[in-house]
Amino acid sequence: MAEPAPARPPVDLSAVAWPCRTERLLLRRVTPADAEAVWEVRHHPASHEWLTSSPPDRETYVADFDRPERLDHLLVVERDGQVIGDLMLRLTDAWAQAEVAERGLAVQAELGWVLHPDHTGHGYATEAAAELLRICFEDLGLRRVTAGCFAENTASWRIMERLGMRRESHTVADALHRSGRWLDSYAYAILAEEWRAGRTARGTI
């Protein structure tokens, strides 16, 4: 039996040379000073329809903004100097058997995104999410990236499919929406080698 690959040094978002630029956008790590701008993105009903939590009032949200669990994995998206959305890039451990558990630490990531409704319809979310994949696989050297959403969140899962992610599961009535409805969920993923093959096929490498 071949020996498993050795554990790699741990990584976190500080390993990335922020900010990262795309053709039209700038992605950077969030700071406490971004609280008001992120509130403006998230408090709109069309923005938080599918988010895990609905933002409370402005004062509460801003006062509670600089929690480490938020700052550690949140990014903002700027267009011409204006914050138009935010992104989640959360490093996660792979499931592993006990004898090789250390080799599965922080080798994958979960992604998420939200854009202010005034800036949807221009491809910005897809552009930002595509850069997130590049960061994950090139800058952080991860092996797998996942994303999930309510099945009714068509805009989100279409982004995942445009990025070349595969739908790995469709779970039925497993997620409780704040409206009180039990909704279906989708889970998507892509491996580093699949992402590189897709880039090669598109002629972007």
Image: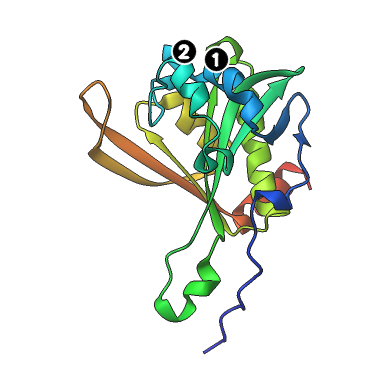
- Rate crowding at label 1 as few (under 14), some (14 to 19) or many (20 or more) other CA atoms within 10 Å: some
Question: Residues at badges 2 and 1 in contact (C-beta under 8 Å)?
Answer: yes
User: Residue 47, can we see it?
Assistant: no
Label tally: 2
Q: Is residue 187 above or below residue 122?
A: below
Vertical arrangement, residue 156 with respect to residue 107, above or below = above
Judge left or right: residue 99 versus residue 25. Answer: left
What residue lies at 76% left-to-right and 18% top-to-bottom? 81
Q: Which of the 4 image quadrants contains residue 3?
A: bottom right
Dot in front, 2 or 1: 1
- Residue type, label 1: Glu
Residue named by callout 1: 40
Provide residue 200's location: percent of width, then percent of height.
73, 49
Q: Quadrant of residue 74?
A: top right
Q: How is the image coloured?
A: rainbow
Q: Mark 1 falls on what kind of element?
A: helix
Residue flagged by tag 2: what amino acid is it? His
Please say whether residue 36 is visible from this viewpoint: yes
| 123 sits to left or right of 204 | left
Residue under numbered circle 2:
44
User: What whole-number distance in Å separates the C-alpha atoms at marks 2 and 1?
Assistant: 7 Å
